Image (cartoon, grey):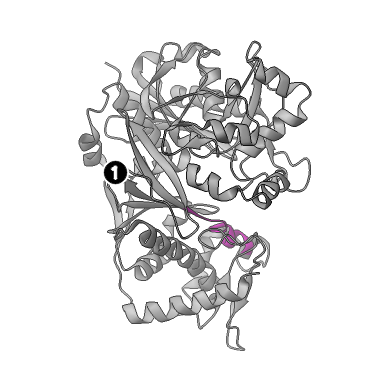
Amino acid sequence: MPRYVLALDQGTTSSRAIVFDRRGRARAKAQQEFPQHYPQPGWVEHSPRDLWETARRTALGALAEADLTAGDLAAIGLTNQRETVLLWDRRTGRPLHRAIVWQDRRTAPHCARLQRAGLEPLIRRKTGLLLDPYFSATKLAWLLDHVPGARRRAARGELAAGTVDTWLLWQLTGGRVHATDVSNASRTLLFNLRTGDWDEELLRLFRIPRAVLPALCGNSEVLGEVSAVPALRGVPIAGVAGDQQAALFGQACWSPGMAKNTYGTGCFLLLHTGARPVRSKNNLLTTVAWRIGGQTEYALEGSVFIGGAVVQWLRDGLGLIARSADIEKLAATVPDNGGVFLVPAFTGLGAPHWDPAARGLITGLTRGANAGHVARAALESIAFQSADLIGAMQADAGLRLRELRVDGGATVNDGLMQCQADLLRVPVVRPRTVETTALGAAYLAGLAVGFWQDRAEIARLWSADHTFRPRAPAAAMRRVHAAWQEAVTRAKS
């Protein structure tokens, strides 16, 4: 009997592979970084072959570390950086251009033209997304317009396009499967949340021929078998989800009002809203969480552009610390922030503000302010921004947050987690297994093949490492939060 599930986690800077056992524990893992390409200011690209080769090599590396063969694996689950777009030849599988990464801003003029034409309300109503270069549609349109002959060949069905999950599925199955899951599709600006399908009006608007797009599938079903990697031949690929939705599933946030926040370079916060999409009035994104057994569930999403990156700035830009891990010790040298607030709007402000022209600032400096106050203000800025997102989400969804489940590298900082609990006035729960993105992909794949029987079995596997409960007086936290919001107002354009 197969004893394990393999998760492939293809991220923005590296690919990882993790082998999970029936108890949801990581038994082996491998990781490999790949180059980032910046051909012009604001442009970010990846080599499609790097994405595939690092995914393949890490899969083999994790298998070798655990001394396993294909027969030991019940299934493979995929999770990926979202919104990044690729275009390739259906016959040869050859990429026609580097992948255009989600961070890429080259299509800002295209988005601006559509906004001036008054089309953003239509797009938002159908997709739940803002009209922004962040999403996939204008990137794919750019490829079709700038790769010689691409638009003509795409209309004839000679080309295939997709996000990173689609590319990996194609490679793993030797070109037999051209598909994407609904969580990734819902990030393209081409997917209609009401119909659950590609939208013909949006395809015409963005000039995307339907023939180039992948088939749509659920998040927990067998899509095909591996044929292109001999050591994995025959293993079913049974779960696919975008990275943030996979983390939501891995955190067992399966009912309305449950939320997770991933603290990385930025922060991604998702709130499960149930079986119907919630339209945001506070500049949040409405997205598919997952589709399982034909039933679609939805989430509200908000992103913090600068989360853990503010700590890197203190290290590399100001030289206040030698290592990122030193931030907690420096912040602990003062009892509070001393009235100092740092708004890290280095690249503008994300949700719920969406102000790309905002810029960072430090307020409240006095002669008595020192490095400890700045360090504390930097850490608190991560918690403040996340609290602002939660407030907007609760207002949109009419749901009361019961607890916040957290993951990502910055969750090792106990001071930050305690500050988050104090601001939100709910428990902040750090799980024992912090690899929640890969774990969510594994769970989705394992459910599809019966490795785990149902969500109830998986829920019993989830356990907390530590729960941070509110300690600071509520009135004091309201005052400090109001002061933070005043600082944000000053940072805005």
Is residue 170 left or right of 111 when viewed as pictured? left
Name the residue type under label 1.
Answer: Trp
Q: Residue 355: tell me if it is visible.
A: yes
| Percent of width and height locating residue 143 | 71, 31
Residue at screen point 51% across, 68% down:
381
In-front residue for pair 432/129: 129
Quadrant of image for the C terminus: bottom right
Residue at screen point 31% across, 35% down:
24
Report helix, strand or loop for mark 1: loop
Residue 94 sits in quarter: top right
Residue at screen point 46% across, 14% down:
226
Position above or below: 42 against 281: above
Figure disc tally: 1
Residue 478 sits in quarter: bottom left
Q: Give the magenta range.
A: 302-313
Let me know if residue 456 is in the magenta part: no
Let me know if residue 307 is in the magenta part: yes
| Percent of width and height locating residue 65 | 44, 26
Q: Residue 57: tell me if it is visible.
A: no
In-front residue for pair 467/448: 448
Question: Tag 1: Cα neighbours inside 10 Å, few (<14), some, or many (≥20)?
Answer: some
In-front residue for pair 49/293: 293
Quadrant of image for the N terminus: top left
Q: Mark 1 points at which residue?
A: 254
| Percent of width and height locating residue 439 | 38, 36
In-front residue for pair 447/335: 447
Is residue 130 left or right of 66 when viewed as pictured? right
Is residue 131 left or right of 261 when viewed as pictured? right
| Percent of width and height locating residue 359 | 66, 67
Position above or below: 336 against 82: below
